[in-house]
């Protein structure tokens, strides 16, 4: 048997939603020589280089309006495809794995031109533009939500759920003190558009705090009202690294409905009120959230329809209803697979041999 290490190119860029699942899969493939394809000035430039060689291509997402800018975008895309093709050839890459977003277009086309297999993971219920366009060119489209296959009739698909970071799969202690038997509400707005959600949470907070409950509020870093509410049971942070420990401790979450956040809620069995980001492309967060509503694992409210009064009363009623909360918690775990990263690693291994 040769000791040649198989070579994998991972193309994942932009937000945690694209990067964390890819990193979770990479952790399962330590026997591979892994290279990474990303975009300059995005999150991958701080997350990836410590672990894997990072190659970057300058590329932008396609807007729907055609115009002069389209010519520049097409030229950038052609350059990115050529760069990816040359990289695959030069590094003798055996297989390409990508997690969607616009970096996946040059990754898929470059792989096809170089005649190496390509696996695309699509975490959203409504597949993104690149997945709809190029999914059928992939050897497999791995799905985060089972129902997504109806949008991809010509692609080969398999439901694998969405990989979460390793720490979600074992108990993680918190590094700040919350008494054991007190209900904890976690409010998290995700990396985009948290400000409206933050406002709602602060307006509801006094009623919840009066009950002796704790609120851990992750505000993101674009909130001018940060620091305006002070209470011993109200813990406010722009960002918290130990999301696994926090959601394991939470009784309830108020959250946007990006695919990664939802998978983390499902894995930690955390019931939720979901407020989809209203400006997400093609309203995809609303469709993600609907899956949780239909499974009775969460409640969904449109941001424009949700008043502080309704949110405050909804959450109060649920936290006081222990039976309902337990039912929702049990329903959560049916929506995600704990071993998603391992399943994807097995698929990559099988396709490479």
Image: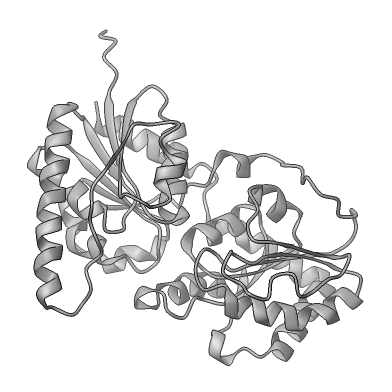
In the picture provided, is 335 more to the left or to the right than 326?
left
Q: Residue at x 19, y 39 (%)?
A: 117
In the picture provided, is 250 more to the left or to the right than 66?
right
State how the image is colored: one colour
- Image vertical order of residue 137 relative to residue 310, above or below: above
Examine the rendering and report whether any part of residue 111 can be seen.
no
- Image vertical order of residue 284 relative to residue 235, above or below: below
Q: In which quadrant will I find the N terminus?
A: top left
The quarter holding residue 67 reads bottom left
Q: In which quadrant will I find the C terminus?
A: top left
The quarter holding residue 255 reads bottom right
Q: Nearer the viewer, residue 72 or 288?
A: 72
Task: Give x and y (percent) for residue 345.
Answer: 39, 35
Task: Give x and y (percent) for residue 77.
Answer: 14, 56
Examine the rendering and report whether any part of residue 61 can be seen.
yes
Q: Residue at x 10, y 37 (%)?
A: 114
Task: Give x and y (percent) for residue 209.
Answer: 86, 74
Task: Give x and y (percent) for residue 135.
Answer: 21, 57
* Total number of numbered discs in the rendering: 0
In the picture provided, is 278 more to the left or to the right than 319?
left
As drawn, the residue found furthest toward the top would be 1
- Image vertical order of residue 242 relative to residue 15, above or below: above
Q: Nearer the viewer, residue 140 or 217?
A: 217
Q: Residue at x 91, y 77 (%)?
A: 210
The quarter holding residue 26 reads top left
Q: Residue at x 62, y 68 (%)?
A: 297
């Amino acid at each position: 048997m040769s000791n040649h290490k198989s070579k994998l190119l991972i193309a994942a860029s932009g937000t945690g939603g694209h990067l964390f699942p890819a990193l979770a899969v990479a952790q399962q493939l330590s026997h591979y020589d892994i290279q990474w394809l990303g975009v300059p000035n995005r999150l991958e430039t701080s997350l990836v280089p410590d672990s894997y060689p990072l190659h970057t291509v300058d590329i932008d997402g396609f807007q729907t309006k055609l115009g002069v800018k389209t010519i520049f975008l097409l030229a950038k895309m052609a350059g990115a495809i050529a760069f990816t093709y040359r990289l695959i050839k030069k590094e003798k890459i055996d297989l390409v794995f990508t997690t969607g977003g616009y970096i996946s277009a040059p990754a898929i086309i470059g792989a096809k031109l170089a005649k190496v297999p390509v696996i695309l993971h699509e975490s959203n219920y409504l597949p993104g533009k690149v997945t709809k366009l190029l999914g059928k060119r992939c050897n497999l489209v791995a799905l985060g939500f089972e129902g997504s296959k109806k949008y991809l009739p010509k692609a080969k698909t398999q439901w694998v759920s969405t990989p979460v970071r390793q720490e979600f799969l074992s108990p993680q202690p918190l590094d700040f003190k919350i008494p054991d038997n007190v209900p904890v509400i976690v409010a998290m707005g995700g990396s985009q558009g948290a400000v409206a959600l933050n406002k709602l949470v602060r307006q509801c907070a006094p009623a919840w705090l009066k009950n002796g409950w704790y609120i851990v509020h992750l505000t993101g870093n674009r909130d001018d009202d940060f620091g305006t509410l002070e209470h011993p049971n109200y813990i406010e942070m722009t960002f918290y690294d130990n999301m696994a420990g926090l959601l394991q401790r939470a009784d309830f979450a108020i959250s946007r409905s990006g695919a990664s956040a939802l998978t983390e809620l499902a894995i930690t069995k955390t019931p939720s009120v979901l407020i989809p980001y209203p400006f997400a492309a093609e309203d995809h967060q609303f469709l993600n959230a609907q899956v949780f509503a239909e499974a009775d694992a969460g409640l969904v409210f449109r941001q424009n329809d949700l008043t502080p009064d309704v949110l405050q009363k909804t959450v109060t009623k649920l936290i006081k209803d222990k039976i309902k909360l337990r039912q929702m918690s049990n329903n959560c775990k049916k929506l995600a697979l704990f071993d998603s990263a391992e399943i994807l690693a097995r698929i990559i291994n099988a396709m490479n041999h």
